[in-house]
Amino acid sequence: MKAFTTLTGTAAPLLEKGKPMPNVDTDMIIPKQFLKTTERTGLSKGLFHELKTNADGSPNPDFVLNRPAYSNASILIAGENFGCGSSREHAPWALLDQGITCVIAPSYADIFHNNCYKNGVLPIALPLDVVEALAAQAGGANHVFTVDLEAQTVTGPDGVVHSFDVDEGRKANLMKGLDEIGASLEAGAAIDAFEEKRRLTTPWLERAS
């Protein structure tokens, strides 16, 4: 998993009627017909498929990620309850395959939120009014944002700095590029020491050979 420290890149606003789109579920992020693989590459073709594709299969030129200015977006701005629906890990995989490593929204569905951290995507929660203001800025001529995980800040094109909260353990793992397995392996020496101490002090707990 790639380490996340700071990110400066284009932010794409996912809008509905001019506001950050709420209740974007995982089926909208990556529809079920694209879940036939366990590979993490190639999934960007299914990302927001129903939004970015017309009924005849042609690209929808009005969809934000189809617009040239946002084709290399690394940050996505959306509305409340982002990632609701089924618990498909393909959702953060598809975002990553598109190059999106950070989502900014007022709130997230729990399972999607957890899956983001497991796969190297930073889900930032900010108040709705702040998210709306950032989305408006992202829709302007300058849509470059900076995310600093160590400082826990988002800076928009207007230079205003917004602070966000993040669990310290998850922050540390993201900054080191560690998923849950990697974090466990990093604690290998401490685990070995604990098991040896238990073997010596409570030998009756050891399984008979």
Image: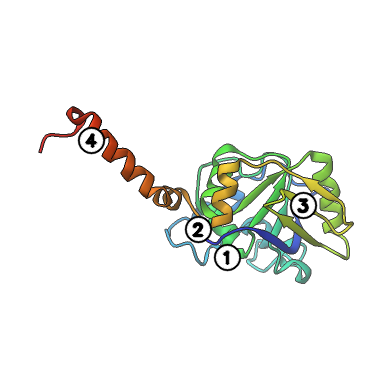
Q: Earlier in the sequence, mark 1 or mark 4?
A: 1
* Residue at (68% x, 62% y) in the render: 74
Secondary structure found at label 2: helix
Secondary structure found at label 1: helix
The answer to whether 153 appears left or right of 97 in the picture is right
Q: Which mark is residue 2?
A: none
Quickly name the residue at label 4. 199
**Relative image position of residue 114 (x, y in whole percent):** 54, 43
Marks 1 and 4: CB-CB under 8 Å? no
Q: Earlier in the sequence, mark 2 or mark 4?
A: 2
The amino acid type found where label 3 is placed reads Val
Alpha carbons under labels 3 and 4: distance apart: 48 Å
Q: Which mark is residue 34?
A: 2
Examine the rendering and report whether any part of residue 30 can be seen: no
Quickly name the residue at label 3. 154
Quickly name the residue at label 1. 45
**Relative image position of residue 186 (x, y in whole percent):** 43, 52
